[in-house]
Image (tube, grey):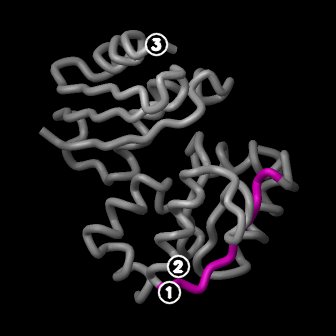
Amino acid sequence: MDPELKTKIENVLAQKRVVLFMKGNPSFPQCGFSARAIAILKELGADFATCDVLEDEDIRNGIKEYGNWPTIPQLYIDKKLVGGSDIMMEMFEAGELQTMLKA
Amino acid sequence: MSPDQMRERLVQFFPESQVEVNDLTGGGDHYEVFVQSKVFTGLTRMEQHQKVMAAFQAELKTGEVHALSIRTQTG
């Protein structure tokens, strides 16, 4: 992938330990899956950054390639892809996301 | 993509597995799928989902399948 775009994505990932790539922002998610991801992070009281992919077409396409994950939202913790909203929900229900956030 | 086409694709990618397809809106682009397969053995949840998404790579890219909710199970 384009090195400049890769750096751009890595700069976003460096903002916080927990970063959510989503459609819209935490106050106004633009898709049901992004809304669900935000609801989970808020429920857990996580300190997280978000990146609105609708604001940046390069990141919107680039992030899919970067983590080999074709859909949005995508949750990253410690610069590693954790998964989309289904995985977040499963991990939340199993108590695994709580553990990861505390680690 | 019709629910039948979705199911066919899953069967093709995951032979000898149990698959379920649920068209969430009736519009043929918001789907929920369930796959129970031996091929998931030893894979993380993320890797399991990646395998399912790979089956619809082209359609996810074009937006023909806009939303894909996935549940996977080993076995």
Q: The magenta stretch spans which residues?
A: A45-54
Decide: few, some or many residues near mark 2? Use Cα within 10 Å; few <14, some 14-19, many ≥20: few
Q: Nearer the viewer, residue A55 or B39?
A: A55
Quarter of the picture containing the C terminus of chain A is bottom left
Quarter of the picture containing the N terminus of chain A is top right
Q: Are marks 1 and 2 in contact (CB under 8 Å)?
A: yes
In-image side of B45 versus A81 (left or right): left
Decide: few, some or many residues near mark 1? Use Cα within 10 Å; few <14, some 14-19, many ≥20: few
Which label belongs to residue B2?
3
Residue B70 drawn above or below residue A7: above
Find disc 2 in the rendering and name its residue: A42
Residue at x 20%, y 35% (from the top left corner): B36
- Image location of residue A89, percent across then percent down: 38, 61
Amino acid type at mark 1: Gly
Chain where mark 3 sits = B
In-image side of B73 versus B63 (left or right): left
Chain where mark 2 sits = A
In-image side of B15 versus B8 (left or right): left
Q: Residue furthest front?
A: B26
Find disc 1 in the rendering and name its residue: A45
Name the quadrant containing residue A6: bottom right
Q: CA distance from mark 3 to mark 2?
A: 36 Å
- Image location of residue A92, percent across then percent down: 35, 69
Residue at x 59%, y 86% (from the top left corner): A47
Q: Are marks 3 and 2 on the same chain?
A: no
Q: How many marks?
A: 3
